[in-house]
């Protein structure tokens, strides 16, 4: 295999960990963003302030500090030691989910009030209005910015190398120590992360197309 791709098979041994943290983190982020976004607009003060506390905490603290706290400090406080890859999934997912919560809240508030009024006129409950009227429209508005956050999460997975996870970045550092071929190794890492981010971007565009398919925009589309 021609240089620099002779190192690629070894470098790709870190890909499964990167994909696991990315996919798991996206799942955690989407769930937490939806729950906190809905909670942020709740009339229940406990739910609302709990959501605000979560959002402001995870947006206001460095992701790497959160990783260190969950992996190194949490066991000292509770005796619970999370596997490194699980800590990465939870922390990065909650961190990105805090930003996503504001996206969800803004998307829900962007739905015209007339839609809710029409649902009420049809005798739909508050849950049915949210499930069948508000969320489908909000999902379309939220998809592009949430897609950007998913790509940010992918790029943030490099941080899990700091808590012993052998991901792409960690494998690249191992190879650099052994071969000193920094230019080849990090150029391949740039390419791999770029390809992965484009895969996420393509998936998001497909989801956006699927959500928008068949919707009536009243001639404003």
Image: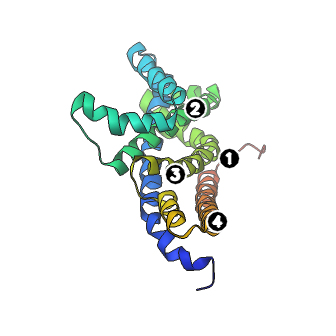
SS label for mark 4: helix
- Residue 216 got which mark? 1
- Local crowd at mark 2 within 10 Å, few (<14), some, or many (≥20)? many
Residue 104, position in %: x, y?
A: 55, 34
Q: Mark 2 points at which residue?
A: 108
Q: How crowded is mark 1: few (under 14 residues within 10 Å), some or many (20 or more)?
A: few
Mark 1 and 4 residues: CB-CB less than 8 Å, in contact? no
Q: Tell which of 23 and 80 is nearer to you.
A: 80
Q: Which of these two is toward me, 59 or 115?
A: 59
**Depth order, front residue of 3/28:** 3
Question: Which label's residue is closer to the chain start, 1 or 4?
Answer: 4
Q: In the figure, residue 91 lies in which quadrant? A: top left
Q: Element at badge 3?
A: helix
**In this view, 71 is above or below 118:** below
Marks 1 and 4, how far apart at CA: 40 Å
On the picture, is 199 further left or further right than 161? Answer: right
Give the position of the N terminus as an image quadrant: bottom right
């Amino acid at each position: 295999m021609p240089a620099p791709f002779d190192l690629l098979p070894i470098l790709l041994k870190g890909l499964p960990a990167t994909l696991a943290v990315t996919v798991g983190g996206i799942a955690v982020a989407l769930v937490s963003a939806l729950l906190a976004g809905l909670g942020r607009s709740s009339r229940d003060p406990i739910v609302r302030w709990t959501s605000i506390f979560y959002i402001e905490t995870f947006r206001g603290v460095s992701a790497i500090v959160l990783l260190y706290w969950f992996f190194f400090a949490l066991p000292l406080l509770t005796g619970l030691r999370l596997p490194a890859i699980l800590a990465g999934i939870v922390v990065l997912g909650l961190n990105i989910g805090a930003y996503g919560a504001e996206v969800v809240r803004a998307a829900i508030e962007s739905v015209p009030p007339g839609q809710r009024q029409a649902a009420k006129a049809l005798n739909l409950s508050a849950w049915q209005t949210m499930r069948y009227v508000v969320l489908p429209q909000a999902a379309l508005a939220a998809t592009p910015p949430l897609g950007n956050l998913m790509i940010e999460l992918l790029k943030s997975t490099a941080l899990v190398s700091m808590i012993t996870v052998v991901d792409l970045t960690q494998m690249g550092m191992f190879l650099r120590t052994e071969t000193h071929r920094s230019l080849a190794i990090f150029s391949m890492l740039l390419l791999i992360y770029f390809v992965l981010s484009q895969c996420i971007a393509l998936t998001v565009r497909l989801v956006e197309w699927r959500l928008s398919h068949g919707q009536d925009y009243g001639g404003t589309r």
